[in-house]
Amino acid sequence: MINISNKREKNAAYRRTLSLLISAAVNKALPERGIFVHLSLGGAYYYTFTEGPKASDDEINKLKAETKRLIDDDIKIQQCDLGYHEALNYFLKNGQYDTAQLIEQRGRALIKVNRINDFIDLYHAPVLPRTGLISAFDISPYHEGFLLRFPYDEGGALEKIPSNTKIFLAAEEYKKWGHISGVVSAGHLNKIITDGTIKDFVRINEAFQEKWISLIADEIYKRREEIKVVLIAGPSSSGKTTTAKRLSVQLKVLGIEPIAISLDDYYQHPEKVPKDEYGKPDLECLEALDVDYFNKQLLDVLDGKDTVLPVFDFKTCSRKEGRKIRLSECGELLVIEGIHGLNDELTHRIKAENKFKIYVSVLAQINIDDRNRVSTRDNRLLRRIVRDNQFRKMSALGTMAMWESVQRGAEKYVFRFENSADAVFNSALDYEIPVLKCYVEPLLRGIKPGCPEYDEAARLLDFLDKFNMLSSYVVPGSSILREFIGESDFKY
């Protein structure tokens, strides 16, 4: 049952329903073709066909026409249970092998599915009750496949075709690697956890990430004569801090000595912070930082002056004196980490040619199955719940209660600058959901019926149920995942 008072869940249900309709449309209009969902790009999902040539204009038109017919017919979407063998045989016959493998791995007697006439697909989370409730959509050619476009808000206008090509290319490179490794869905991942080959997969995951950090360091090294400031930004729980630390190690290998600066140390006193629409201090906005003081310190450092960096005390909400730094001429630069790093207003007194910007995102290439993706938002939320509980003694309820505010901040102050980055780093790890599950599942079970966050907790528990658990002992000390679960080799 959808909580119709929850705008975010209504919008999510709209997108899930549209994804279900695309699967049904492919099944009817292009039965010889299978589809694979790759990633979310703003107001769209990117799909390709699993085999054969790229999507043709004729195929896209057929898909669009069949989807529109399903909407016009206003068909009731039913949720029902199928027996294990009936569901398994259906998905094998329909060519949905990732879904079939997931069912085999879970081994449940009853499988919950969505049904539209004679088409069925695995149930993952609430959808709209009827197909006719879809008011706006489009299918547009994009690279090797197509975009399924939808409005951000139910009943709103469609978003423009996204232009964030750097995000797309970074995600597609990861997807390409995933297909080479043969582990692209929850069922595949569960299998290698069960058969004991997960350690090798973890090592390869970590090596792949280290390679990309190394490549970014190489780009900075090529421009070492002009770059003075490296800015690392991304939404909450994207792993910015560990990315900065691992990049610093790679820069040292190249003979560059980085000096780390955290934007958190430039917060203003809450009384000076602008209020949000709810009358609370908007700690996500740029004005929450003392931008003028920050720029003055940057210029002092770049001029070779001795500079005492501040340390923000979150208990007293005041700045204290921290360490003294001086930028020498022996290959040093500043590495600055924080959500506003890509916004040029933050560093308005620093020349553009002296800056190198890195956007950090969580672009999971692991899907639930071929037609249902792992949400970047959910991945970051699970990380945040675990980290808040491990290091801030906050309950899952507390984290989830503030998450919408965090998300609004990311949409207003982070996502719109992602295309200005010189490099994109994907901090997702294909094995992380099973590890996070060990920590977050008992925390979510502590949220009881009657709490506003109960429905969301139940949805996340259902999502986690599709993955086997994996002990944290396999996670290296230098991993980005250690930023959230603890026992990192780095100090924070």
Image (cartoon, rainbow, N blue to C red):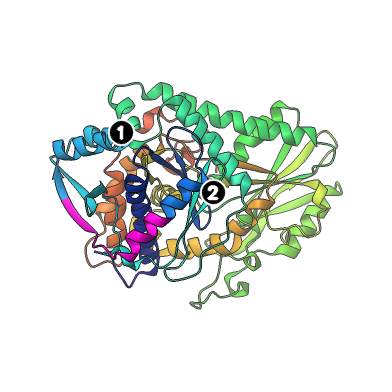
Secondary structure of the residue carrying tag 2 is: strand
Q: Could you classify mark 2 by the number of other residues whose Cα lies within 10 Å: few (under 14), some (14-19), or many (20 or more)? A: some
Which of the pair 220/177 is nearer the observer?
A: 177
Identify which amino acid the numbered label 2 is placed on.
Answer: Pro
Q: Could you tell whether 348 is left or right of 38 in the image?
A: right
> Which residue lies under the disc numbered 2?
141
Residue 267 percent coordinates (x, y): 62, 62
Q: Kindly identify the residue that appears in the image at 60 percent across and 55 percent down.
A: 339
Which segment is the magenta one?
Answer: 65-80
Residue 155 percent coordinates (x, y): 43, 71
Residue 395 visible? The answer is no
Residue 250 picture quarter: top right
Which of the pair 207/187 is nearer the observer?
A: 187
> Which residue lies under the disc numbered 1?
97
Identify which amino acid the numbered label 1 is placed on.
Answer: Tyr
Residue 449 visible? The answer is yes
* Quarter occupied by the N terminus: bottom left
